[in-house]
């Protein structure tokens, strides 16, 4: 991972005044290059500093989310496939809150666009989706841009402490109400009646 980070940084160093633009474009093309979001945010933090690295990362990640939104709206067949995959991965549980999605985006091995799909399901319009994407992407961009270079040197104790803190926050930021659809509620009664 450090090798990929040094390659990204060497490419962006030679971009000169266009480095922020190339960095934002790299965020938008990230999913096609199979690069983790955190890795690019770390490169932004090292190259541009924590403030500008965070800002450019928020812009790039949000534009990537907007492209994902546009592609799924243009191709509803793929949206249905992604929803089925999400159903298999997440299952029938309460929907995530925006705070929970922001925390899950901090975890490097959880698929970024699966979480963007969760944001898509909880919003009703493009404007609302964009706002929710910015809010859920900001902690990711800030954490990896500011503290990204420390991640390689984390001890096991610190790593476990951070993981425990994230689990507590994940629980505290859950949705407090639970909406059950009529058909889902009576689905068990139907299956019990058929078996009897």
Image (tube, rainbow, N blue to C red):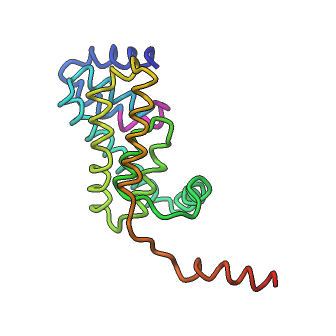
| Residue drawn at x 43%, y 25% as measured from the top left | 157
> Residue 97, percent across and down?
38, 59
> Residue 95, percent across and down?
46, 62
| Residue drawn at x 39%, y 31% as measured from the top left | 38
Q: Main secondary structure of the magenta part?
A: helix
Quadrant location of residue 30? top left
Quadrant location of residue 121? bottom left
Q: Is residue 58 left or right of residue 165?
A: left
Q: Is residue 9 left or right of residue 84?
A: left
Query: Which one is in front, 4 or 162?
Result: 162
Query: Which one is in front, 180 or 164?
Result: 164
Instruction: Identify the magenta region.
Output: 27-35
Query: Which one is in front, 154 or 50?
Result: 154
> Residue 17, percent across and down?
17, 22
> Residue 173, percent across and down?
35, 55
Say which quadrant the C terminus sits in.
bottom right
Query: Which one is in front, 177 or 146?
Result: 177
């Amino acid at each position: 991972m450090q090798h990929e980070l040094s390659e990204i940084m060497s490419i962006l160093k030679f971009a000169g005044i266009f480095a922020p633009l190339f960095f934002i474009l790299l965020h938008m093309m990230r999913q096609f290059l199979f690069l983790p979001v955190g890795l690019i945010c770390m490169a932004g933090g090292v190259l541009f500093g924590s403030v500008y690295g965070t800002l450019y990362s928020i812009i790039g990640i949000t534009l990537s989310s907007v492209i994902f939104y546009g592609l799924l709206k243009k191709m509803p067949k793929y949206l249905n496939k992604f929803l089925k995959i999400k159903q298999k991965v997440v299952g029938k549980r309460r929907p995530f809150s925006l705070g929970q999605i922001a925390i899950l985006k901090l975890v490097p091995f959880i698929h970024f666009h699966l979480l963007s799909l969760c944001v898509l399901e909880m919003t009703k319009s493009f404007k609302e989706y964009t706002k929710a994407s910015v809010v859920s992407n900001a902690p990711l961009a800030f954490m990896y841009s500011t503290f990204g270079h420390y991640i390689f040197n984390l001890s096991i104790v610190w790593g476990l402490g951070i993981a425990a803190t994230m689990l507590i926050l994940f629980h505290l930021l859950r949705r407090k109400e639970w909406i059950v659809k009529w058909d889902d509620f009576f689905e068990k009664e139907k299956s019990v009646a058929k078996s009897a």
